[in-house]
């Protein structure tokens, strides 16, 4: 990120590979402080742009030969530091203290039974506060100048500071919700120790981003592929505010959207004043998918046809310079991580996969935002709550919810089932309590009885999960009465379906989608 983009308080979060590091960034952002996450071994060029530093946890032991190392002289005594877990142990191990294997397993909930009085870092933290531990090593002796601030029954040096410098360290994880006062610890560090200003707000982001986009784009034209999802929608409205009619939006119907979604979303977009063209390419997609059963081949086929359709439509707009994408911050983080780019579990299709021959420059107005921040920005832009609150929907659409080959008849069947399920969730005030929901058409027939006749028809599965980011998910305990009613309606109204099942698998080990 360019330092001119955001002029307020900036915190540098250095990642040592912990699974919780993104959570730290999100919690800091929730406190309205701008936070950038960088690998410990890939520091940003301009360290002077940052007013404070947080060191993350790590799966490594500081005692291991391959322990991650960082030159702390770049920061110590120069900027306020909060060292979390691995960071706290690193300070102790290499600066005069002692770290050793723990006598007891220090994992899970613990309570702070000692809190040093009159310490700004501990302000408003109640006695016996619950914290979350996750480490196999422990700090036996504090580093030179260390002052103990807090203890649990098993961890004497649960928190400490270094005398004479604004360096603080904790062996627990304040970013996870199990640490009941975790946000208070972070707030104390940010505002009482580091003296940062909480200026990272949705309105501030809109103002600075619109100004930056005007300078970056100038009088050039931009093309954006809209999907109906939150990210592309917010990106479109933000760009529209900056450059107006210079933005050309294309909404492609791949024939695999939800029932009636192409027209309804298109109308919503037009009502928002966007310069948009709807392209019904359902025949091209379904023809290309005929006979394809392998999930990865499905995804790649959809991606290829999307590129062909999008490229054809984009070429009808003369003198386009920029391609806009709805890239968000987790995508950026995953592309530059401690261990390199994340392993691909499944391939995705989006506009980001466009080939080099299109020769377009990239503009990504949301690349600094987490998903929840995108929604907050969208609300400040006046985007309808119906659009902002939409459940995530996979790029390949219903193609990966139809197991086996894709036919127009199967798509129509699943669209009907899905519509009954989603509308029922909305009618029963359950939609907003679910992170993602949908139906899956299974490649099997089962025996049923309707009236006096024996049937041999399709089985569908319903899926509803709760999650924060899609990385993990639990199935939602929908009321039995609700499921009974929905099942009955599907079987009565959707020809060719005689059995409904409910998926009660969590992620992991299952995925949210079935393919």
Image (cartoon, helix red, strand yellow):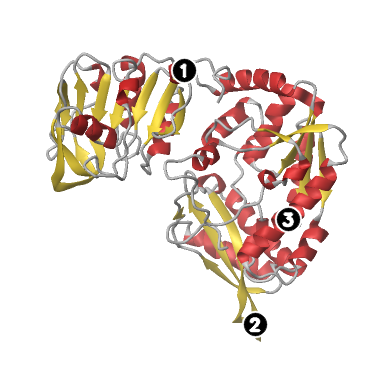
Could you tell me how far apart the alpha carbons at marks 2 and 1 are, in whole angstroms? 67 Å
Residue 116 location (% of width, % of height): 15, 22
| Side of 137 where 465 appears, left or right | right
Helix or strand or loop: what does disc 1 sit on? helix
> Is residue 12 positioned above or below 316 on the image?
above
In the rendered image, which residue does mark 3 sit on? 304
Are circles 3 and 1 on residues that touch, CB within 8 Å? no
Number of the label disc, if any, that sits on residue 118: none
Q: Which residue is mark 1?
A: 49
Q: Residue 204, image x and y in percent?
A: 57, 18
Disc 2, SS: strand
Tag in front: 3 or 2: 3
Quick check: 73 above or below 88? above
Looking at marks 2 and 1 on the same chain, the residue that comes earlier in the sequence is marked by: 1
Marks 3 and 2, how far apart at CA: 36 Å
Identify the residue shown where x is 43% and y is 37%. Answer: 22
Is residue 386 visible to the viewer in this orientation of the structure?
no
Q: Earlier in the sequence, mark 3 or mark 2?
A: 3
Look at mark 2 in the image and give the residue it sits on.
456
């Amino acid at each position: 990120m360019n330092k001119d983009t955001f002029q307020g308080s900036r915190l540098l979060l250095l990642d040592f590979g912990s699974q919780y590091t993104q959570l730290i960034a999100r919690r800091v952002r929730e406190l309205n402080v701008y936070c950038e996450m960088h690998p410990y071994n890939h520091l940003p060029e301009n360290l002077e742009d940052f007013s404070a530093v947080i060191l993350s946890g790590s799966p490594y032991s500081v005692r291991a030969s391959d322990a991650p190392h960082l030159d702390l002289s770049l920061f110590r005594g120069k900027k306020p530091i909060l060292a979390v877990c691995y960071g706290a142990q690193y300070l102790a191990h290499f600066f005069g203290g002692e770290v050793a294997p723990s006598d007891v397993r220090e994992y899970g909930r613990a309570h702070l039974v000692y809190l040093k009085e009159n310490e700004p870092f501990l302000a408003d933290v109640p006695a016996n506060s619950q914290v979350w531990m996750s480490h196999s090593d422990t700090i036996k002796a504090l580093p030179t100048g260390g002052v103990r601030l807090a203890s649990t029954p098993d961890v004497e040096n649960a928190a400490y500071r270094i005398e004479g410098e604004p360096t603080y360290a904790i062996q627990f994880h304040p970013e996870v919700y199990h640490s009941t006062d975790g946000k208070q610890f972070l707030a104390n560090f940010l505002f009482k120790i580091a003296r940062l200003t909480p200026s990272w707000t949705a309105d501030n982001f809109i103002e600075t981003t619109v100004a930056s986009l005007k300078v970056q784009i100038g009088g050039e034209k931009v093309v954006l592929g809209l999907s109906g999802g939150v990210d592309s929608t917010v990106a479109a409205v933000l760009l529209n505010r900056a450059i107006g009619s210079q933005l050309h939006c294309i909404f492609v119907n791949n024939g695999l959207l939800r029932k009636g979604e192409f027209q309804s979303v298109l109308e919503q977009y037009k009502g928002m004043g966007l310069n948009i063209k709807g392209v019904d390419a359902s025949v091209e997609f379904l023809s290309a998918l005929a006979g394809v059963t392998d999930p990865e081949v499905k995804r790649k086929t959809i991606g290829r046809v999307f590129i062909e359709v999008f490229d054809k439509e984009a070429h009808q707009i003369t003198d386009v310079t920029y391609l806009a994408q709805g890239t968000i911050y987790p995508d950026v983080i995953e592309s530059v991580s401690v261990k390199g780019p994340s392993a691909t579990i499944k391939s995705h299709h989006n506009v980001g996969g466009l080939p080099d021959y299109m020769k377009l420059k990239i503009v990504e107005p949301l690349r600094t935002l987490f998903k929840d921040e995108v929604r907050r920005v969208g609300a400040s832009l006046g985007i309808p709550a119906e659009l902002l609150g939409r459940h995530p929907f996979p790029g390949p659409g219903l193609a990966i919810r139809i197991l086996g080959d894709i036919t127009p008849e199967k798509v129509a069947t699943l669209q009907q089932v899905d519509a009954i399920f989603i509308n029922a969730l909305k009618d029963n005030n359950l939609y907003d309590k679910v992170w993602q929901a949908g139906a899956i058409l299974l490649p099997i027939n089962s025996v049923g009885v309707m009236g006096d006749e024996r049937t041999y028809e399709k089985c569908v599965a319903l899926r509803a999960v709760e999650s924060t980011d899609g990385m993990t998910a639990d199935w939602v305990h929908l009321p039995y009465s609700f499921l009974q009613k929905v099942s009955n309606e599907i079987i009565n109204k959707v020809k060719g379906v005689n059995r409904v099942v409910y998926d009660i698998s969590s992620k992991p080990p299952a995925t949210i989608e079935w393919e």
